[in-house]
Image (spheres, helix red, strand yellow):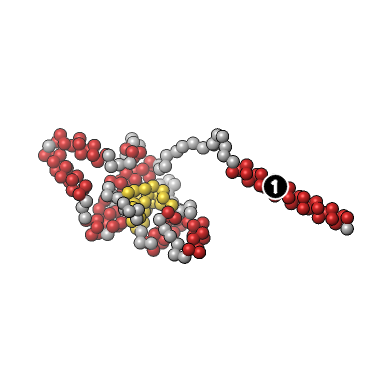
C-alpha cells in the first residue's frame, strides 16, 4: 500500500510539474519582446500595385481596398456555425476588394503573378463570392481589360454606362486640353491625386 501511495503521489507530482512547465512556456511565448524580430514591408508587390492603380482609376467613384479577408464582408447564415466557418476562412483574402461608399462590397480581384493564389483557393472564392452576389475575377498585370468591361462585370451593363459627374468633368477637361494645351498639366495633376500614393512610384510601369 505504501509503495502504491508513493507511486500515485509521484505521478501526481509529475503531472503537476508538467502542467506548470507548459504554462510557463506558454507565458514565455506570449510575452512581448523588447526587440521584435520583425521589419516593415510593402503591403503589395509591384504587380499587385500596378493592378491596384488601374482598378482605382477604373472605379474612381468607389473604394478599392487591398488584402481584405473574406470573413470581413461575409456572414454565416446560421450563427451556431460562425466559429466553424471563421476557422475555415480566416486565412482567405482577395488581393483587391472594391466597395461602395456604404461599405458594401461589389467585387474582388486576385492578381496573377509569381506568388498568385493557388487554383484551389480561386475556386473556393469563386464559389463563395458568387453565392453572396459578389463579382470575382483573376487578372494578370500585363493583360488588363478595359475599364468599361471590369465595371460591367462588377456593376452590370446599365450601371457601368452611368457616368458620375466626376467623369463628366474629366471628359470636359480633356476636350479643353486639346483646344488649349496649357490645361494639360492641370488635368494630369488632378488625375494623379486620385491614385494611391504608393502606386505613383517609379516601379509601376
Q: For the residue labelled by badge 1, is the local secondary structure a helix, a strand or a loop?
A: helix
Q: Mark 1 points at which residue?
A: 20
Q: In which quarter of the image is the N terminus?
A: bottom right
Q: Position of residue 61 (x, y in %)?
A: 27, 49
Q: Position of residue 44 (x, y in %)?
A: 40, 43
Depth check: 64 or 113 in front? 64
Q: Where is residue 40 in the image (x, y as percent from the top left)?
A: 46, 37
**Res 184 visible:** yes
For the residue carrying disc 1, how many other residues have a C-alpha within 10 Å: few (<14), some (14-19), or many (20+)?
few
Residue for point 50% across, 64% down: 80
Residue 34 relative to residue 179: left or right: right
Residue for point 48% across, 63% down: 79
**Res 107 visible:** no
Depth check: 195 or 76 in front? 76
Residue for point 34% across, 43% down: 50
Depth check: 119 or 181 in front? 181
Depth check: 158 or 143 in front? 158
Residue lying furthest right in this view? Answer: 2
Residue 81 relative to residue 96: left or right: right
Q: How many marks can you see? A: 1
Q: Position of residue 167 (x, y in %)?
A: 21, 48
Q: In which quarter of the image is the C terminus?
A: top left
Residue 149 relative to residue 125: left or right: left
Quadrant of the rendered structure where residue 193 is? top left
Amino acid at each position: 500500500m505504501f509503495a502504491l501511495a508513493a507511486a500515485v503521489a509521484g505521478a501526481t507530482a509529475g503531472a503537476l510539474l508538467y502542467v506548470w512547465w507548459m504554462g510557463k512556456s506558454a507565458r514565455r511565448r506570449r510575452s512581448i519582446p523588447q526587440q521584435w524580430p520583425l521589419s516593415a514591408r510593402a503591403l503589395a508587390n509591384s504587380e499587385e500595385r500596378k493592378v491596384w492603380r488601374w482598378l482605382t482609376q477604373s472605379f474612381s467613384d468607389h473604394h478599392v481596398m487591398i488584402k481584405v479577408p473574406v470573413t470581413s464582408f461575409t456572414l454565416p447564415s446560421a450563427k451556431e456555425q460562425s466559429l466553424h466557418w471563421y476557422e475555415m476562412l480566416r486565412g482567405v483574402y482577395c488581393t483587391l476588394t472594391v466597395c461602395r461608399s456604404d461599405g458594401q462590397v461589389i467585387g474582388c480581384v486576385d492578381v496573377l503573378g509569381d506568388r498568385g493564389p493557388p487554383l484551389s483557393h480561386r475556386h473556393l472564392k469563386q464559389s463563395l463570392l458568387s453565392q453572396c452576389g459578389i463579382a470575382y475575377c483573376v487578372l494578370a498585370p500585363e493583360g488588363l481589360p478595359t475599364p468599361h468591361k471590369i465595371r460591367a462585370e462588377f456593376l452590370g451593363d446599365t450601371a457601368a454606362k452611368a457616368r458620375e459627374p466626376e467623369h463628366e468633368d474629366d471628359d470636359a477637361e480633356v476636350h479643353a486640353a486639346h483646344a488649349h494645351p496649357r490645361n494639360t498639366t492641370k488635368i494630369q495633376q488632378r488625375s494623379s491625386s486620385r491614385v494611391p500614393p504608393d502606386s505613383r512610384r517609379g516601379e509601376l510601369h
